[in-house]
Amino acid sequence: LESAYGSAQRKKRLKVLINPFGGKGSASNLYKTYAAPILAAACCQVDVQTTEYRGHAIEIAEHLDLDAYDAIICCSGDGLPYEVFNGLGKRPNGREALAKMAVALLPCGSGNGMTWNCLGTESVSVASLAIVKALRTPLDLVSVTQKNSRTLSFLSQSFGIIADSDLGTDNVRWMGAQRFTYGFLVRLMQRTIYPCDLAIKVEMNDKKAIKDHYRTYASQEYDPLAERIRLEATSQSPALPELEYGTVEDELPKDWEVVPGQNMGNFYSGNMAIMSKDTNFFPASLPNDGLMDIVTIDGTVSRTTSLKMMTEIPAGRFFDMPDVAIRKARAFRLVPHDKDGYISIDGEKVPFEAFQCEIHQGLGTVLSK
Ligand code: ADP
Ligand code: MG
């Protein structure tokens, strides 16, 4: 992330959470071997806890003494940071808690998007050093509503072939990150249409305008610290911001663009640029511009084109392909037509039912190089 602020805090006080089931199950060893010595050498104060069940990190973050730590470090994949943001958000002073407590990921899972984006590496030792030197940075977070539940997402929301490749491959965890590619190829050979209703509160849909926005925002003129101060001054409540567009249960706002979804192949909304190694899926994504980047691709494109899309991602040529639609948006609603399937929020499976998302500018805080 380009827009970190302040000077790096020395001797950080860290709450370290270890997911014993992340990735290939070696988070604890990775932490002890590659992270602990570096954090010790940097005089960080560490308090290590292993998560005991799914959802445990939500509870830990919800009840943690916010004055006793500077950051929560997850040794896992993107699943634990997702829980941590949600735990912080569940507190009565959710907005304050998310502004105060920084979150970082030591890459020990199969999907380590957060580390790629914030620390630029997949090496646990390099990431540890980056955490020692890192700065606090505001990060946009997305509210997701389904029926009457509300959760927070920091990385991505997907429906279609990517959600399927991600969540439908739990049986081949031993493959590590390769399971996503494997899942994608298997699905490409089987079925590629995922019908849905889709409506988007669009901010920009022209690729040139999106690139210009990216250049302006990523330039020096933007000052994230001033931005955070402005946001804090304008919001009156210490609690989570209210939903500007209501929930998925409310009537659809009139000014949203209705996007044909009968032939949807891939719906992918990103809050950070890089989703996994060599996958800069949202090259125009910015950490705190208050906008999500939404990619939609028809499932009727040929298999050859789909494969080409995949191979063009590392070189960044994916963005300009004519079959790839990209929008910057403030909110969207997606209603699946099928009875079962997968919806992925930050790589976690959520119920296969209508969901609505809206973004909150700079609501969360990460450690970034
Ligand atoms: P990966 O990238 O390999 O999926 P994650 O760290 O994202 O790894 O974790 C995967 C899932 O493991 C998350 O949904 C998280 O809630 C869950 N989890 C965390 N701790 C435990 C535990 N002790 N037992 C079972 N599941 C856990
Ligand atoms: Mg953004």
Image: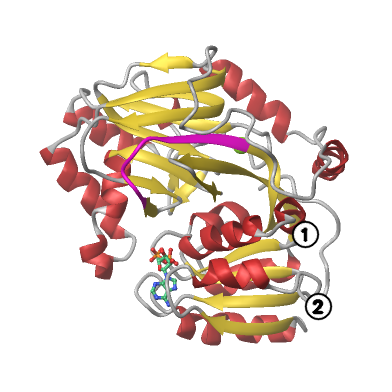
Residue occupied by mark 2: 11
The CA span between labels 2 and 1 is: 17 Å
Residue occupied by mark 1: 100
Q: Dot 1 lies on which element?
A: helix
Q: Which residues are magenta?
A: 350-359
Would you say 147 lies left or right of 287 here? left
Q: Nearer the viewer, residue 133 or 99?
A: 99
Dot 2 beta carbon under 8 Å from ligand 1: no
Query: In the rendered image, which quarter is residue 2 located in?
Result: top right
In which of the image's four quarters is ligand 2 placed? top right
Q: Residues within 10 Å of mark 2 (few under 14, many from 20)?
A: some
The image position of residue 74, as x and y in percent, is 56, 70
Would residue 315 be counted in the magenta stretch? no
Question: At x 25% / y 21%, what residue is drawn?
Answer: 262
N-term-proximal mark, 2 vs 1: 2
User: Which quadrant is home to the C terminus?
Assistant: bottom right
The image position of residue 199, as x and y in percent, is 44, 21
Q: Residue furthest left?
A: 190
Q: Nearer the viewer, residue 261 or 165?
A: 261
In the image, residue 282 above or below residue 258 = below
Question: At x 11% / y 40%, what residue is drawn?
Answer: 190
In the image, residue 205 above or below residue 338 = above
Question: At x 15% / y 47%, what residue is drawn?
Answer: 186
Q: Main secondary structure of the magenta part?
A: strand
Question: At x 41% / y 36%, what residue is drawn?
Answer: 268
Residue kind at label 2, given as amino acid type: Lys
Observer able to see residue 146: yes
Q: How many marks?
A: 2
Query: In the rendered image, which quarter is residue 230 located in?
Result: top right
Would residue 352 be counted in the magenta stretch? yes
Would you say 75 lies left or right of 92 here? left
